[in-house]
Amino acid sequence: MFIQLRRPKKESGVVLLMTLMAVVVIVIMSVAIFSQSMNQTSTVQKEIEQIRAKQLMMGYFWNAYTNAYVSGGNLVNMTDSVKLYNKTYSVAGNWVGNIYNLSVSY
């Protein structure tokens, strides 16, 4: 059907094979890099939420402590819910023995 201008060499398939192997390796590396990037994104998001929860808890503690100091009373049991960046954080503070336990869940 097609006219062959030259005789095919025995090594003519080696270049194609090497090119295909290089493409496969590049695709595998691209998928691995994309997967790693997605894992880092989710890890960073979890760390951001932990930092927000910690800062919220510290703010609630110092607010309750200041109110107790000004009123001359003790820290009181409390529950509250706050929405930050489309995420709801629940704050609960209560006495457990002699320890004031303050927790934040999200």
Image (cartoon, rainbow, N blue to C red):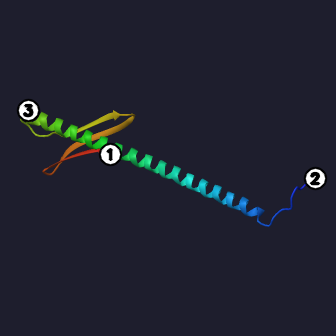
Q: Amino acid at mark 3?
A: Val
Q: Amino acid at mark 1?
A: Gln
Q: Nearer the viewer, mark 3 or mark 2?
A: 2
In the image: residue 33, left or right of residue 78: right
Q: Which residue is mark 3?
A: 70
Q: Nearer the viewer, mark 3 or mark 1?
A: 1
Residue 13 sits above or below residue 94 on the image: below
Please give the label number shown on residue 96. none
Q: Nearer the viewer, mark 2 or mark 1?
A: 2
Sooner in the amino-acid sequence: mark 3 or mark 1:
1
Q: Which residue is mark 2?
A: 1
Residue 29 in view of the camera = yes
Q: Which residue is mark 1?
A: 50
Q: Amino acid at mark 2?
A: Met
Q: Residue furthest left?
A: 72
Sooner in the amino-acid sequence: mark 3 or mark 2:
2
Residue 106 in view of the camera = no
**Depth check, front residue: 2 or 28:** 2
Specify few, some or many for label 1: CA neighbours under 10 Å numbering under 14, 14-19, or 20 or more: some
Task: Please report contact status of discs 3 and 2: CB closer than 8 Å, yes or no.
Answer: no
In the image: residue 29, left or right of residue 89: right
Q: Residue 73, position in %: x, y?
A: 8, 37
